Amino acid sequence: MLQDSDTIRISDVNEAVVHGILEVISDGVWDWHVNTGFVYRNPGWYWMLGYEPHTLGNTVFTWESVIHPDDLAAVMAKFDLCLSGSTHEYRAEYRCRTRDGSYLWIEDCGRIIERNPDGSVARMIGAHRNIQANRLLQEQLEQRNHSLEQLVAERTAELARLNDELQQKVAENRELAETDALTGAASRYRLERALQLECERARRFHQPFTVIAMDVDNFKQINDSYGHHAGDQTLINIVARIRRHIREIDLLARWGGDEFMVLLPNTSHADALLVASKFQALMASEPVSPHVSATMSLGLAEYQQDEQKESLMVRADRALYQAKLQGKNCIR
């Protein structure tokens, strides 16, 4: 049977064996005897920070003094959670100041292995592990990710800018395609699209619509006698006059040369005839040319059920031709 003295000798031997093992471990190991305040730190702990073994004080203050000031509060918060029993172990990553003044990232882990009869901590052991290489790699990866994110953000912004420019250019091209450059009236391209939609709408809802084809009488004489500038200004003035006397849903388009068409949705032939008469009256009351009294011939065609836009435009053009043959400045 072992005597008390034998137990003490075995305990001393075991302690010596443990400390002997700790002396050759490269990682930093610490052993905190809380009741006495003594902290054993193995040589690996000192070498990790660039010190000769056992050249610093064997107290907890030595540990606190090497923790980076920016990390201290977070480290102590985790340490207190372990001391209070809220967590079964203490684990933290932080920077430790080395002998040359630089800082080294370490991982610190600890566990309570002995308590006093009143439940307070009596002994705690732990280890420091150098994780500098891992942290540097992590920081490099984070920096690389940040750079990639920044590059993606820059490329995304550039693509958004280019897309905006493209959309603006598309809008400008659409405007150019749909607008007559000289008079500002709708282009022939836009008129044909609008006619197609209006034919579909009339076919679907059985609503009438009418087109008016218009041509400036003796326009060639204006160009020949007073120059193309006078002719151009006459066309510009005609568009300005007519625009002020049509509805928003109506469409005035330049068909070509001195020919125009007005699309009148939801308008019967009889109502369109009133509109055409108004145009004639405008030409007489508001001169569009400073040199001569310009008149217009007009031809009307009302949509017929299931008619194609090409047929409708042909009928309007024929009506205009008849107005020209019958003396001009008239409506057919």
Image: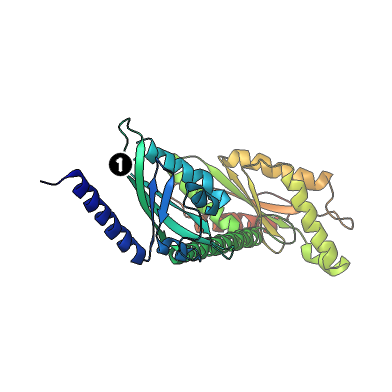
Task: Please give left or right for residue 169 compared with residue 119 in the image.
Answer: right
Seen at 79% across and 48% down, the residue is 283
Task: Please give left or right for residue 147 compared with residue 184 in the image.
Answer: left
State the image coordinates of residue 71 (x, y, percent, origin top left): 53, 49
Q: Residues within 10 Å of mark 1 (few under 14, many from 20)?
A: some
State the image coordinates of residue 42 (x, y, percent, origin top left): 39, 60
State the image coordinates of residue 213 (x, y, percent, origin top left): 64, 54
Q: Quadrant of residue 175?
A: bottom right
Q: Nearer the viewer, residue 330 or 194?
A: 194
Seen at 24% across and 48% down, the residue is 8
Q: Would you say residue 318 is visible in this rendering?
A: no
Seen at 74% across and 52% down, the residue is 239
Q: What residue type is disc 1 on?
A: Glu
Q: Nearer the viewer, residue 325 or 4?
A: 4
Q: Would you say residue 153 is visible in this rendering?
A: yes
State the image coordinates of residue 271 (x, y, percent, origin top left): 62, 38
Give the labeled residue for mark 1: 114
In the depicted structure, whether residue 92 falls above or below residue 131: above
